[in-house]
Amino acid sequence: MDKLHHNAVLVSVHCTKWTHQIADEEASNKLAELVGGEAASFRASKDIGKHPVIKALDKLIGQVGNQIVRKLTLPWNESQKFLVVDLLEKFEGAIRSKNDLMDEYKRELRQVWPQIIEDARRRLGDQFDERLYPDVEEVIEKYSIKYELDVLPNLSDARLSLGADKLEQVKDQVRKATEEKVQGITQAAHDRVLNVLTTLIDGLERHGKKAEGAKRASKFSDNTVDEVTALAEILPSLNVTGDPALVKASNAILSKLRNLDPEELRKNSTKREQAASQAKDIRKDLSDALSAFD
């Protein structure tokens, strides 16, 4: 396990944003009074920053978790993620791109801030409170995307002022904890593959079918294929333990599912059935391997 510290790092990602959904006690009380209910049973809020650029900033913050952290890292502990060195440059580039886009949105926010306040004055009526609007620079500072890198435990380089027996005991505890975490990230990699394959299969099989109560038939999306393609590109790097089942799944995805064409799949039912069948075979092989391991 000690060699992992050469091939991976731990990363902590911190995202912050301006809180513009504000609880409104006065409005809550009025609502309760209007319907004859208890005030404690109602909670009203108001959006003091309803504007496309605010919405874009909030969405961008969410994308850091969904598009970068979730896809490029594996779980390690509550505050840190496991990031293989092979994906570090990709990770940092993705974060840099989000920060660049955030800077563009911030410049726009400076320009429209007076308009946001005036629109809120109109929208919120007597619930408008100008004291809730700080200087625009304070709002801009609320939006941030930062990360910190740390090294993995290196038992061969442990330097503690302990006796030999106690030092070995500490090393053994750290070693066991690290082994459990490595098992956890391997399981997380398995789960990621299974989830992506299941989403692909469901999308292919539901395409063109109308679920009960639905207004329109289901449509296979490009994003479903994009998820498979993205996984195929990074799965070899995520397989930090060289797990044979993941190697087999990775090779199968690369050879059978990497070049799927979403438009062709939407038009051709035979292609959809073929792709779904291949995905099911890969999923079954991986599931069987996990069952055998358990």
Image (tube, helix red, strand yellow):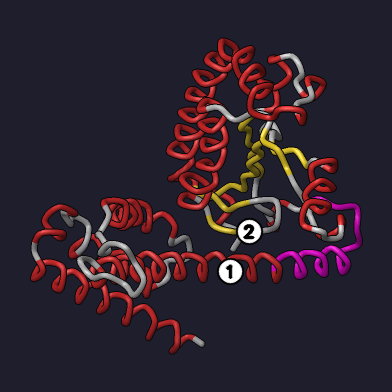
Under circle 1, the secondary element is helix
> Three-letter amino acid code at disc 1?
Gly
Tell me what residue is drawn at x 18 percent, y 65 percent.
256
Question: On the picture, is 284 further left or further right than 72?
Answer: left
* Depth check, front residue: 226 or 13: 226
* Depth check, front residue: 35 or 166: 35
Work out how far the residue at label 2 is from the one at label 1, CA to CA, in angstroms.
Answer: 8 Å
Q: Which residues are magenta?
A: 159-175
Question: On the picture, is 233 further left or further right than 5?
Answer: left
Is-magenta flag for residue 84? no
Whether pointer 2 and pointer 1 mark residues with C-beta atoms closer than 8 Å, the reply is: yes
From what the image shows, is residue 145 above or below residue 201?
above
Q: Position of residue 207 (x, y in %)?
A: 23, 66
Give the residue pinned by disc 1.
Answer: 184
Q: Position of residue 204 (x, y in %)?
A: 23, 67
Tell me what residue is drawn at x 64 percent, y 16 percent.
118
Give the residue pinned by disc 2.
Answer: 76
Dominant SS in magenta: helix
Q: Position of residue 189 (x, y in %)?
A: 46, 65
Q: Position of residue 64 (x, y in %)?
A: 53, 41
